[in-house]
Amino acid sequence: MTTTALTTLPQPRPRTGAAEWAGRGLTTLFALFMAFDVGLKLTGLPVVDATMATLGWPAGSGRIIGVVELACVALYLFPRTAVLGAVLTTAILGGAVATHVRVASPLFSHVLFGVYLGLVMWGGLWLRDARLRAIFPARR
């Protein structure tokens, strides 16, 4: 009988208390921001099209991106598919970073904003999910 690599990892202690609540807080913060972002994109406000045009995206692309973001964040919020949702959302955030690099946006406020969001998203998931902590343990 063979064992897989995941079954041989040391089992992390379950998080309780402050760490669990911090993970939920980070996840909530990320979800609220993304809900606001998706909401703006799905409304079709003229400011969304203007902003997208400034970034080099055609008119109407905000809605499509908003639908994709909504699907990815929904996957992230459902515990069974949270890691898949985080990976897909990371891809979207990477596209945002690349877009801002291409149009020479300011580094810390625009280019790295997707990185900041990704850190909040993955940090919240890491604090909430013992399986993820087993794969990526914190070293003392």
Image (cartoon, grey):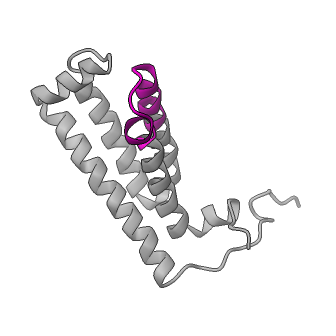
Q: Residue at x 47, y 82 (%)?
A: 18
Q: Residue at x 46, y 40 (%)?
A: 112
Residue 104: give x, y in percent of width and height. Answer: 42, 23
Task: Please say whether residue 118 is one of the residues in the magenta stretch.
Answer: no
Q: Quadrant of the C terminus?
A: bottom right
Question: In the image, which residues are magenta?
Answer: 93-113
Q: Quadrant of the N terminus?
A: bottom right
Residue 44: give x, y in percent of width and height. Answer: 13, 29
Q: Is residue 44 left or right of residue 122?
A: left
Residue 95: give x, y in percent of width and height. Answer: 45, 29
Q: Is residue 3 left or right of residue 52?
A: right
Question: Which residue is most to the right?
Answer: 1
Residue 57 in the image: above or below residue 29: above
Q: Which residue occupies the foreground of this view, 37 or 116?
A: 116
Residue 89 in the image: above or below residue 134: above
Task: Please say whether residue 98 is one of the residues in the magenta stretch.
Answer: yes
Q: Which residue occupies the foreground of this view, 86 or 55?
A: 55
Question: Which residue is most to the bottom?
Answer: 17
Residue 76: give x, y in percent of width and height. Answer: 42, 52
Q: Is residue 72 left or right of residue 61?
A: right
Dominant secondary structure, magenta: helix
Q: Which residue occupies the foreground of this view, 7 or 133?
A: 133
Q: Quadrant of residue 32?
A: bottom left
